[in-house]
Image (cartoon, rainbow, N blue to C red):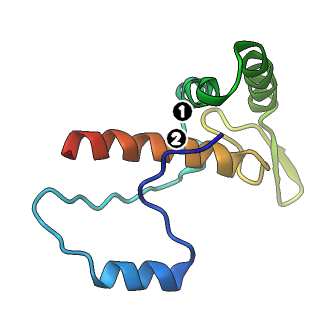
């Protein structure tokens, strides 16, 4: 699945170089993301994932992947200081899929902002 990301960087040095040449105008916004994983809306992110998968997969394969994804997100436990936790919202920190889910959601937000500006 290819993500339509407009705002990516390779590493912190690349980010610093890119930011040094950015021309800022009144349409630009800086967004601060606090507590990213617990604030990812899982149902919305599942819908976004499904839309992205349907671009490059058949409906049967997409349904299978979404079923697996829902199962993983329901079993959303994580361990911290030898205690097991179940977050009441969002996705678990440390889960192998959490970074991907966060990336999908943030790219969706970025694409909406990009479309609104252009």
Q: Residue at x 54, y 51 (%)?
A: 36
In this rendering, is residue 74 above or below 81? above
Give the side of residue 20 with respect to residue 5, left or right: left
In this rendering, is residue 45 above or below 38? above
Q: Residue at x 65, y 30 (%)?
A: 56
The residue tagged 1 is 41
Give the side of residue 20 with respect to residue 72, left or right: left
- Within 10 angstroms of label 2, few (less than 14), some, or many (20 or more) residues? many
Q: Residue at x 49, y 45 (%)?
A: 4
Report how far apart the C-alphas of labels 2 and 1 lie in the structure: 8 Å
Q: Residue 115 location, x and y as percent?
A: 28, 40
Quadrant in which residue 108 is drawn: top left
Quadrant in which residue 116 is drawn: top left
Label 2 with label 1: CB-CB less than 8 Å: yes
- 110 or 52, which is in the foreground? 52
Q: Residue 58 location, x and y as percent?
A: 71, 18
Q: Residue at x 30, y 85 (%)?
A: 20
- 60 or 36, which is in the foreground? 60
- 88 or 96, which is in the foreground? 96
- The reply to whether residue 63 is visible in this rendering is yes
Number of residue marks: 2
Give the side of residue 76 with respect to residue 43, left or right: right
Task: Give the position of the N terminus as an image quadrant.
Answer: top right
Q: Which mark is residue 87?
A: none
The residue tagged 2 is 105
Give the side of residue 71 with respect to residue 91, left or right: right
């Amino acid at each position: 699945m290819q993500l339509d990301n407009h705002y990516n960087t390779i590493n912190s040095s690349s980010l610093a170089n890119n930011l040094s040449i950015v021309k800022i105008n009144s349409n630009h916004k800086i967004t601060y993301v606090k507590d990213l994983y617990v604030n990812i809306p899982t149902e919305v992110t599942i819908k976004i994932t499904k839309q992205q998968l349907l671009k490059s997969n058949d409906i049967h394969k997409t349904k299978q992947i979404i079923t697996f994804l829902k199962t993983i997100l329901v079993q959303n436990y994580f361990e911290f200081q030898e205690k097991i936790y179940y977050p009441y919202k969002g996705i678990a920190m440390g889960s192998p899929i959490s970074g991907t889910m966060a990336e999908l959601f943030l790219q969706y937000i970025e694409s909406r902002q990009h479309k609104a500006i252009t």
